[in-house]
Amino acid sequence: MTSQHNEIDALYPAVYDELRRLAAAQRHKQAPSETLSTTAIVHEAYLRLAEGGAAHWNDRAHFLAVASRAMRFVLVDHARARTAAKRGGRGQAVSFDEAAIVMDDRSEDVLAIEEALQRLEAHDARLGEVVQLRFFGGLSHEEIAEVVQRSVPTVKRDWTRARVWLHRFVTDGMTSE
């Protein structure tokens, strides 16, 4: 086993609780029939972190950013697999509110959010980062402020602006089909 794997394995107990907290936030937003468990999200995210060689985080904020991105890809890949199996129509309208982005059909809507997020990142990377941390990472405004090194009021304004853009991108995507 390489020293990098040893370092990551040594870090696992330290980061497991934090990964579990982030994954639990995701589970609260998922439909009751969703098959991806909190433990599965944590383990998949851990594997992605280990594969990416992300054993050296500068601090907790850096770890939260990297973990949020890993969870984003876990959830998007899972949603792609589920929709590929269904091969049905597009998702229903997605509602954006302050606490979370509420979705009825999780898989299709995760993909709609991912597509909208990619468009948002191309338009404004700063807003995209806030959405990734809030939606996929489940971070609070205070935690996001720590990660992005901005004030909490600025993060709240960015979240509000991002929701407007995401709504526009999702709505455009649904009407263009």
Image (cartoon, rainbow, N blue to C red):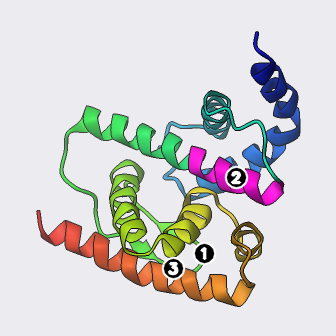
Q: Is residue 65 magenta?
A: yes
Placement of 142 over or under 116, stated as above or below: below
Q: Amino acid at mark 2?
A: Leu
Above or below — where is 82 with respect to 25?
Answer: above
Q: Which numbered tag is attached to residue 97?
A: 3
Q: Residue at x 55, y 66 (%)?
A: 129
Q: Which residue, given by chain and number where applicable, does mark 1 sit on?
A: 99
Please identify the residue farthest to the left as the structure is shown. 177
Where does residue 160 sit, x and y in percent of width and height? 52, 85
Question: What is the spatial separation of the Cα atoms under label 2 and label 1, in whole angstroms?
Answer: 15 Å
Q: Residue at x 42, y 67 (%)?
A: 121
Which of the two discs, 2 and 1, labels the residue nearer the N terminus?
A: 2
Q: Please report contact status of discs 2 and 3: CB closer than 8 Å, yes or no.
A: no
Q: Residue at x 12, y 68 (%)?
A: 176
Mark 1 is surrounded, within 10 Å at the Cα level, by few (under 14), some (14 to 19) or many (20 or more) other residues, namely few
- Picture mark count: 3
Of discs 2 and 1, which sits in the foreground? 2
**117 to 52, vertically: above or below:** below
- Badge 2 vs badge 1, beta-carbon distance below 8 Å: no
Quadrant hosting residue 155: bottom right
Q: What residue lies at 77% left-to-right and 75% top-to-bottom?
A: 142
Q: Amino acid at mark 3?
A: Asp
Magenta stretch in the rendered image:
59-70
Instruction: Name the residue at the top extreme.
Output: 1
Residue 22: mark: 2
- Mark 3 and 1 residues: CB-CB less than 8 Å, in contact? yes
